[in-house]
Amino acid sequence: MSQPVLAARLGITFQQIQKYEKGKNRVSASVLYAIMCALNVPAAYFFDGVGAGGTKPLEADPVAMEDMNAVQAMLASQENMKLLHNYLGAPPAVRKAVRSLPSSVAKDVT
């Protein structure tokens, strides 16, 4: 799959995909999950061999562990899984509108 196609499926630019590939930007747990869904691969695909050959274990990065724990808690709910699945299946323009919804609602409440 090309970078532009993957980027379109994720609702981001292909330049952002390049930054992830080059290590210029950190891939959050939620983005990694979206990439897994777009590529239809399990998490093990990205972590095969982690911990071998002198690499640092995931526990060495508390921010990554915190992100992963938050994602695991979120994914434990069937309702959240259905919401995420539907969100990822929506066109990029719809996903963008959905992402802006919480801040719009917060402005209306205050």
Image (cartoon, rainbow, N blue to C red):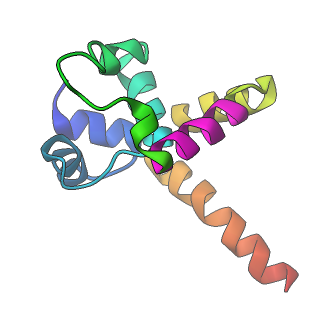
* Residue 103 left/right relative to 43: right
**Residue shown at 33% from the left, 14% from the top:** 45
* Residue 62 left/right relative to 60: right
| 55 or 104, nearer to the observer | 55
Which range of residues does the magenta coloring cover? Answer: 63-74
**Residue shown at 23% from the left, 28% from the top:** 55
Residue 4, image x, y percentages: 20, 40
Considering only vertical position in the picture, is 57 above or below 109?
A: above
The N terminus - image quarter:
top left
| 95 or 45, nearer to the observer | 45
Can residue 60 be seen by looking at this rendering? yes
* Residue 67 left/right relative to 36: right
**Residue shown at 29% from the left, 32% from the top:** 56
Residue 11, image x, y percentages: 39, 47
Our reading of the magenta stretch's main secondary structure is helix
| 104 or 73, nearer to the observer | 73
Report if residue 80 lies within the magenta region.
no
